Image (cartoon, helix red, strand yellow):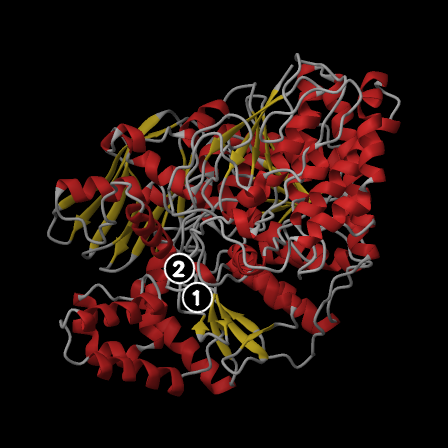
């Protein structure tokens, strides 16, 4: 009667899973729906990448590859929680921690020389950055704010910082010699195999990528960013920030654009500390301290060289960095109290999270003095920078938006089959010599060619025709379903977008658009139009490419709802299955730190609730499972009640946290099921559970609050396996929840989870609630050290297709996070 695959990921979402997954299983069993798990965490993926080289007892199945294959079938029904897109510093720290737990992984090779090191680097490169989403996303994206969430935001508006008409906050972007301006694009007339090669000035040819299979109608782009133009641009912006007395900040996406953006980040670090690199660059670069991994990695590298007595002027170099910080413009800060700047870690400031947060906060970021200040936001590539400038201009002219009245900007995003820039990682190269980069077909014809210099960053992207057709269809479908205007955010002056415009004009007439308002605008103009309508309380569907999908589904939800984690994210897979993503809130490392400190997990599982309802609804539609449809409808109602009753997690000890929200969701869901009239058997099955939950509400809520306040620990070591039948107290249901008989009672298993009845049985339901309680006589051992630099990995579980019997990877988290 159906199956749901629930992914086990990282950090706060993983911790919440131990509480919520048993509840899901209990409800799903009444509709004959099996719930299985797959481990796609950073730790799990890292170990899986080397499993063929590891001892048998350390090997992990490649769950991500398995799900990638499943996503191409009609049977797919996958709930995907947020996972870590690891930067190099995060991945390196993860590897070290896994090694410390006995996993026989090789070190991450910064500069691989031997064949063995090159093999290790290739494996690690498949794990870092956005390694998960491109594999699973075999469909395009439909993201929107559900009515219950939008209504809650209007009735309980979040704070918005006031804007001043004389705000000096602005966006700086290159506009010339960047990826947008240098882009060339072709549409393939037939299936082909392409080669990307570099032809040096002396005629020497170097193959950068061969065997690149393409299909008829596929759009292939090539472009580059000039390193010398980038350096000149950065020097100008650093001087401008100093002259205008505003904070200097850079906004990239080193996690998703895992090849190009770390290189750009290194340029920013070297530009800001230009005097230091002029004086000591030979030493720093020889030691690999080029800024690519951030200022923190440079300073840590200097400390390491000092400890090894390999540097006799380390103090002098550090003093030069301190002087540059004092003499340069004020840097925007990630954590003013701890001295963590915008330049410390590439993954600390992610453009799609940092820019909306800045706009929401009066156009301010935090300065070194711990005070807010106007900011020069540097976004080197001009492809999408104008979107943020348009919103800033609107706020400067008209003030902050009002969540009580503002409209919405839902998104239809082109992302299937690694579309556009987010599929460019294996086709991005830093040039080592001047010459030409050519994209050549099997016949030897040069399709794309660029003159490049050493240091330039060249990349190619692909967008297949079938996903484009599906994207156009999905845009039409959402416009027809809502009646809202839909705007394709495409720039006719950009080579790639010009080809997409031609395809939109080709495929849109295949649909009955009579009476619909569907148009095409350049991104900055589309942003202006959308915010004009937002202020009138009107909705406008943004139909975008892959990167703007990512940017817009943070920008507008953060302004409308206060967070992007509350968006409904549905991916109708092209072959008939469904992928249901649980929001864009990241994996919230600071939430884990708070849990360790005071046993309080403030992660909001609203995204999981929304995705689960859509997953059940998909089973109802695709398999004719009426009970799954009932679960979907009643879960939506329960979620609405949860919001209106203000039972979502708060932020501080003594208030409801993640486990408490799971209890209330289960209670409201049981109540809704007990009173619905579509399925009398289901109503009867949940009647006693609803009654017991309601009668014991105060007792259960009190128990869940009572465990807060004291430090909690979460498992011993990065990958220390746990006994397969052991689950810690904080993942077990509260005793009050485990002990109730339900109508048609069935015995509980030793860990408190309900034993399965025959498929489809609805007679009697026991609802377990996770507690996260950690008692003095039953303490966990923490994989999260309280000191140290970088990232940390949680424990890797013993494989399970049910509620995890041991802890899964808590994940890798940096010391601080812009959206934490």
In the image, 547 versus 201, the foreground residue is: 547
Q: Quadrant of residue 371?
A: bottom right
> Which residue corresponds to the image point at 19% horizontal and 57% vertical from the top-left?
434
Query: Which quadrant of the figure contains the N terminus?
Result: top right
Q: How crowded is mark 1: few (under 14 residues within 10 Å), some or many (20 or more)?
A: many
Residue 506 appears left or right of 233:
right
Q: Count the labels in the image.
A: 2
> Which residue corresponds to the image point at 33% horizontal and 86% vertical from the top-left?
323
In the image, 5 versus 88, the foreground residue is: 5
Residue 144 is labelled as: none
Across and down, in percent, residue 739 comes to 71, 32
Query: Which quadrant of the figure contains the C terminus?
Result: bottom right
Q: Is residue 490 visible?
A: no
Q: In which quarter of the image is residue 501?
A: top right
Inter-mark Cα distance, 1 to 2? 6 Å
Across and down, in percent, residue 318 comes to 28, 80
Residue 418 appears left or right of 289:
right
In the image, 5 versus 686, the foreground residue is: 686
In contact (CB < 8 Å): disc 1 and disc 2: yes
- Above or below, 170 relative to 596: below
Residue at the spot of label 1: 174
Residue at the spot of label 2: 178
Across and down, in percent, residue 807 comes to 48, 40
Across and down, in percent, residue 149 comes to 76, 47
Q: Is mark 1 on a helix, strand or loop?
A: loop
Q: Is mark 2 on a helix, strand or loop?
A: loop
Residue 104 appears left or right of 347:
left
Q: Residues within 10 Å of mark 2 (few under 14, many from 20)?
A: many
């Amino acid at each position: 009667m159906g199956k749901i695959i629930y992914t086990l990921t990282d950090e706060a979402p993983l911790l919440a899973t131990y509480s919520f997954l048993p509840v899901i299983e209990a409800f799903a069993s009444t509709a004959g729906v099996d719930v299985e798990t797959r481990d796609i965490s950073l730790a799990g993926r890292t170990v899986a990448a080397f499993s063929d080289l590891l001892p048998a007892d350390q090997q992990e199945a490649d769950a991500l590859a398995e799900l990638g294959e499943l996503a191409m079938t009609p049977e797919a029904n996958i709930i995907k929680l947020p996972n870590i897109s690891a930067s190099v510093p995060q991945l390196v720290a993860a590897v070290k921690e896994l090694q410390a737990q006995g996993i026989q992984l090789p070190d991450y090779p910064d500069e691989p020389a031997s064949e063995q090191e090159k093999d290790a680097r290739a494996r690690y490169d498949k794990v870092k950055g956005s390694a998960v989403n491109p594999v699973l996303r075999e469909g395009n994206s439909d993201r929107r704010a559900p009515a219950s969430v939008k209504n809650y935001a209007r009735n309980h508006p979040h704070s918005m910082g006031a804007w001043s008409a004389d705000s000096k906050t602005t966006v700086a972007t290159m506009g010339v010699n960047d990826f947008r301006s240098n882009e060339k694009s072709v549409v393939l007339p037939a299936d082909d195999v392409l080669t990307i090669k570099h032809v040096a000035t002396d005629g020497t040819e170097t193959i950068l990528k061969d065997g690149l299979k393409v299909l008829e109608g596929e759009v292939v782009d090539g472009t580059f960013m000039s390193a010398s133009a980038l350096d000149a641009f950065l020097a100008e912006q650093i001087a401008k920030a100093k002259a205008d007395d505003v904070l200097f900040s850079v906004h990239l996406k080193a996690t998703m654009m895992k090849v190009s953006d770390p290189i750009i980040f290194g340029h920013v670090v070297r530009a800001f500390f230009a005097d230091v690199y002029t004086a000591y660059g030979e030493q720093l670069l020889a030691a690999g301290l080029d800024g690519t991994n951030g200022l923190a990695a440079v300073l840590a590298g200097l400390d390491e060289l000092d400890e090894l007595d390999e540097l006799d002027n380390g103090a002098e170099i550090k003093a030069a960095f301190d002087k540059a910080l004092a003499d340069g413009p004020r840097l925007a800060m990630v954590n003013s109290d701890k001295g963590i700047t915008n330049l410390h870690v590439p993954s600390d400031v992610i453009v799609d999270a940092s820019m909306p947060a800045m706009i929401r906060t009066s156009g301010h970021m935090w300065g070194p003095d711990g005070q807010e200040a106007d900011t020069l936001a540097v976004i080197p590539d001009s492809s999408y920078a104008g979107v943020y400038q348009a919103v800033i201009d609107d706020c400067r002219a008209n003030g902050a938006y009002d969540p009580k009245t503002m409209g919405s900007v839902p998104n239809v995003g082109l992302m299937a089959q690694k579309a556009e820039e987010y599929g460019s990682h294996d086709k991005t190269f830093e040039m080592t010599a001047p010459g030409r980069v050519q994209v050549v077909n099997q016949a030897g014809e040069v399709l794309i060619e660029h003159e490049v210099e050493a240091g330039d960053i060249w990349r190619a992207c692909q967008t297949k025709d079938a996903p484009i057709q599906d994207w156009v269809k999905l845009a039409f479908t959402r416009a027809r379903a809502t009646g809202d205007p839909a705007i394709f955010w495409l720039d006719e002056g950009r080579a790639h977008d010009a080809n997409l415009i031609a395809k939109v004009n080709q495929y849109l007439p295949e649909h009955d658009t009579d009476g619909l308002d569907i148009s095409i605008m350049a991104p900055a103009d589309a942003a202006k139009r959308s915010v004009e309508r937002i202020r009138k309380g009107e909705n406008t569907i943004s139909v975008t490419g892959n990167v703007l999908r990512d940017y817009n589904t943070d920008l507008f939800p953060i302004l409308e709802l206060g967070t992007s984690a509350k968006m409904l994210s549905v991916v109708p897979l092209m072959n008939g299955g469904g992928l249901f993503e649980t929001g864009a809130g990241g994996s919230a490392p600071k939430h884990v730190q708070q849990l360790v400190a005071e046993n309080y997990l403030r992660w909001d599982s609203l995204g999981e609730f929304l995705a689960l309802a859509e997953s059940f609804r998909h089973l109802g539609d695709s398999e004719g499972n009426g009970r799954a449809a009932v679960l979907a409808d009643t879960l939506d109602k329960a979620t609405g009640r949860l919001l209106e009753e203000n039972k979502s997690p708060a932020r501080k000890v003594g208030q409801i946290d993640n486990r408490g929200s799971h209890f209330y969701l289960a209670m409201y869901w049981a109540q809704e099921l007990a009173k619905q009239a579509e399925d009398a058997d289901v109503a009867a099955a949940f009647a006693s559970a609803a009654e017991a939950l309601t009668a014991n509400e105060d007792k259960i809520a009190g128990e869940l609050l009572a465990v807060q306040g004291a430090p909690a620990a979460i498992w011993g070591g990065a990958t220390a396996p746990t006994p397969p039948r052991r689950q810690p107290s904080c993942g077990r249901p509260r005793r009050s929840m485990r002990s109730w008989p339900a109508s048609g009672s069935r015995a509980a298993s030793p860990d408190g989870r309900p034993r399965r009845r025959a498929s489809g049985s609805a007679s009697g339901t026991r609802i377990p609630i996770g507690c996260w309680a950690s008692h003095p006589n039953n303490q966990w051992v923490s994989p999260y050290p309280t000191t140290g630099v970088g990232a940390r990995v949680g424990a890797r579980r013993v494989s399970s297709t049910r509620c995890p019997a041991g802890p899964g990877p808590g994940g890798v988290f940096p010391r601080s996070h812009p959206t934490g």
